[in-house]
């Protein structure tokens, strides 16, 4: 009878990531210490038992001190019997240089052997290695895609999105970045769009707005409506790309024509830029009509009205937005800004404090605290009015 132990892979780098979307099964310690486990494995000569002892030494659990040389010994015993989990761990040890000299060729050999036996983590790690192309391993996106497919059986865009969502929940941003690199020519530009987002925000890679612009453009040309909006913003703002309102409006309109209401909001801002208040207002209202519960759209419309000194109208929109997004620090800040503008400093302070309560962004917190400090100083100033006699 095989013993079972709790096994938790310690993730030392983002190269090694979780593949199964299901919760781990609950397993139980049936032996008291590492020596008992070793004795049991020697008695059974079973490759699973040998691998489990290796994992205990690799992770330093069940009373075992972390010992890579002993882990290597037990993994090798099981790997000689072609046990895939043992070969996976040997691949990890050679990839990371854990107790052995780093050797990516050996790591790939062990990963391949494990993957051929159906080990999904080994397949995922190979997908990463071939997509990264580092450490004298040439980039090979064909191989990368092949092994990612072995890991997750990605055969349509919905499955691809499910994998991306799963990795995002696990905060495996490097996995997302390289998965999208491998599939960048598939699914009507969606992987290109996500890849652009990783470069734009620095998720799993260094932030690089030039690369983000390139991939947003490629994705937009493949027909991705979300990428069209991002590309249009690059042209509208003139960051990286040369400022070009005509191109911005073109891409916002094209996105909107595909049913993406964010395109309407973007086009509204372009019209606001050139002083066409009536057209901008009309486009904001179209966007909200298409998505009446979109708090982002309603807040944006409120800010547009605020910018154009329509303070009462702005407050009405903010009130709608806060009912949809009751914990939004940005909306509370906007309400505070509006009350400050119309001279109701008590209300301004009240809403800025609410904004500070919900803010989790340090830059926003700093901005709100500066506003509150400035208001405090203004209150402390002596009155300049002449007292009545």
Image (cartoon, helix red, strand yellow):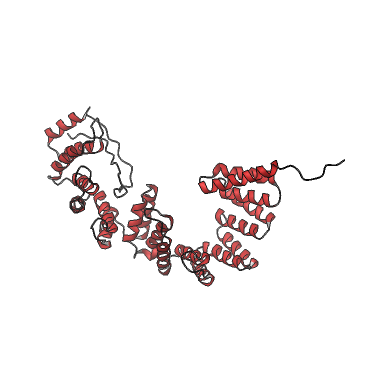
Task: Point out the image quarter for the C terminus.
Answer: top right
Above or below: residue 56 compared with residue 245: above
Image coordinates of residue 230 in percent, x first then y, are 47, 63
Above or below: residue 160 compared with residue 344: below
Residue at 64%, 46% in the rendered image: 374
Above or below: residue 206 compared with residue 383: below
Q: Is residue 294 visible?
A: no
Residue 340 in the figure: left or right of residue 205: right
Image coordinates of residue 299 in percent, x first then y, are 59, 54
- The answer to which image quadrant residue 212 occupies is bottom left
Above or below: residue 331 compared with residue 209: above
Q: Is residue 131 visible?
A: yes
Depth check, front residue: 379 or 122: 379
Depth check, front residue: 129 or 38: 129
Image coordinates of residue 141 in percent, x first then y, are 28, 62
Residue at 20%, 34% in the rendered image: 3
Residue at 66%, 61% in the rendered image: 308
Residue 185 in the figure: left or right of residue 276: left
């Amino acid at each position: 009878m095989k013993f079972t132990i709790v096994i938790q892979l310690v993730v030392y780098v983002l190269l090694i990531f979780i593949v199964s979307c299901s919760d781990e099964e609950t397993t139980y310690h049936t032996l008291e210490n590492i020596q008992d486990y070793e004795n049991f494995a020697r008695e059974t000569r079973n490759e699973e038992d040998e691998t489990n002892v290796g994992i205990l030494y690799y992770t330093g659990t069940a009373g075992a001190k972390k010992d890579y040389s002993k882990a290597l010994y037990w993994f090798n015993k099981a790997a000689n019997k072609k046990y895939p989990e043992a070969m996976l761990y040997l691949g990890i040890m050679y990839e990371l240089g854990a107790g052995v000299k780093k050797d990516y060729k050996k790591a790939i050999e062990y990963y391949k052997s494990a993957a051929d036996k159906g080990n999904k983590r080994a397949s995922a790690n190979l997908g990463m290695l071939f997509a990264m192309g580092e450490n004298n391993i040439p980039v090979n996106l064909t191989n990368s895609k092949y092994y990612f497919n072995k890991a997750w059986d990605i055969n349509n865009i919905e499955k691809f999105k499910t994998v991306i969502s799963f990795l995002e929940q696990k905060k495996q941003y490097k996995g997302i970045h390289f998965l999208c690199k491998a599939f960048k020519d598939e699914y009507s530009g969606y992987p290109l769009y996500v890849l652009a987002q990783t470069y734009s925000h620095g998720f799993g890679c260094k932030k690089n707005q030039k690369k983000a612009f390139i991939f947003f453009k490629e994705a937009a040309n493949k027909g991705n409506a979300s990428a069209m909006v991002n590309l249009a913003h690059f042209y509208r703002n003139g960051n990286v790309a040369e400022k070009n309102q005509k191109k911005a409006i073109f891409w916002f309109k094209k996105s909107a024509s595909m049913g993406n209401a964010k395109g309407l909001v973007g086009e509204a801002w372009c019209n606001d830029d050139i002083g066409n208040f009536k057209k901008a207002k009309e486009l904001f209202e179209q966007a909200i009509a298409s998505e009446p519960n979109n708090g982002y759209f309603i807040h944006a419309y409120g800010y547009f009205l605020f910018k154009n000194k329509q303070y009462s109208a702005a407050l009405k929109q903010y009130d709608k937005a806060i009912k949809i997004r009751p914990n939004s620090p940005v909306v509370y800040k906007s309400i505070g800004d509006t009350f400050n503008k119309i001279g109701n400093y008590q209300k301004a302070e009240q809403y800025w404090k609410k904004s500070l309560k919900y803010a989790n962004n340090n830059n926003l917190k700093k901005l709100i605290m500066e506003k509150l400090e400035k208001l405090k100083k203004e209150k402390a100033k002596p009155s300049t009015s002449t007292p009545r006699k």
